[in-house]
Amino acid sequence: MSWNFFNRTSKRSVVTKAAERDYERECTKMQHLEDASKKIYKDSKKATAANEAFGKASAKIGQDLITTLGGQVSPPLKAFEIATTKQKQLLQERASLTNQCWTESTKKYNSIFPYYSTQLKTRDKALQEYSKVQAKLDKYQEREHTAANSVKIEQAKREMLPVKADFEQKNSTLMSDMPKFYAARLDYFQPALKASVQSECWVHREVIRTFKNSLNVMDTEAGSKADGKVRNLLEDIRKLSITTDD
């Protein structure tokens, strides 16, 4: 959306320089806010896709190992395959939560900006009409003050009253609403931020727990093999049957 500033085509501006600067400042802030919100929307969609892709790729490694080794699948390898499959499910849930927290919330937030775009255009149209009538009044006032010209001046003044009031009302509404909307941005995104952090904590906690279970299986298997080696060594010692003669 293009955030147009004051129309400067009129010979003499109907608004003060201070008012013009204030309006430009608020429009600039709104432009930056819209740009940032659109980036959040795009980046959240990328994050969702990346989560799903990573989960699928990780699970594929476990599945490929099972397929490659065939009937020689060990408990640790099976535990790893189960862990990567579980991780895939968790990352899919994480992607869904990211979509809810950021993609959908920013999509809804971004839908508000077209409303302001319409209001800006309406205000700009009112400003042009106000400037047009003001220019006509200025032209009459610069002429010789004849009776006929005085009538035109009074007519232009009466014509200017409603268009001036219309512009001031639209301008006042925007200058009240835009700062409020901008200031409320943190209140809007705070719940999404909190929900996002909570979901990240939950997903990572579950992923760690899943792979710890896999690691425990591996440690148990390694311990069993070590115990077997010790038993074999003791058996070999007994087979030596060393005796001494008196």
Image (cartoon, rainbow, N blue to C red):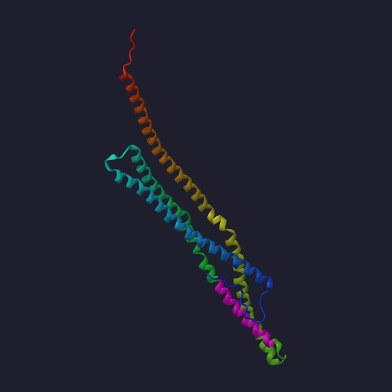
Most extreme residue toward the front, as rendered? 245
Residue drawn at 42 percent across, 52 percent down: 51
Give coordinates of residue 229: x percent, y percent.
Answer: 35, 28
Q: Height in image: 8 above or below 88?
A: below
Q: Quadrant of residue 125?
A: bottom right
Q: Quadrant of residue 123?
A: bottom right
Q: In which quadrant is the C terminus drawn?
A: top left
Give coordinates of residue 212: x percent, y percent.
Answer: 42, 38
Q: Is residue 230 left or right of residue 108?
A: left
Residue drawn at 40 percent across, 47 percent down: 90
Give coordinates of residue 224: x percent, y percent.
Answer: 36, 30
Residue drawn at 27 percent across, 43 percent down: 70
Q: Height in image: 246 above or below 227?
A: above
Most extreme residue toward the right, as rendered? 145
**In terms of secondary structure, what is the magenta stretch mainly?**
helix
Q: Nearer the viewer, residue 169 or 98?
A: 98
What's the magenta region?
120-140
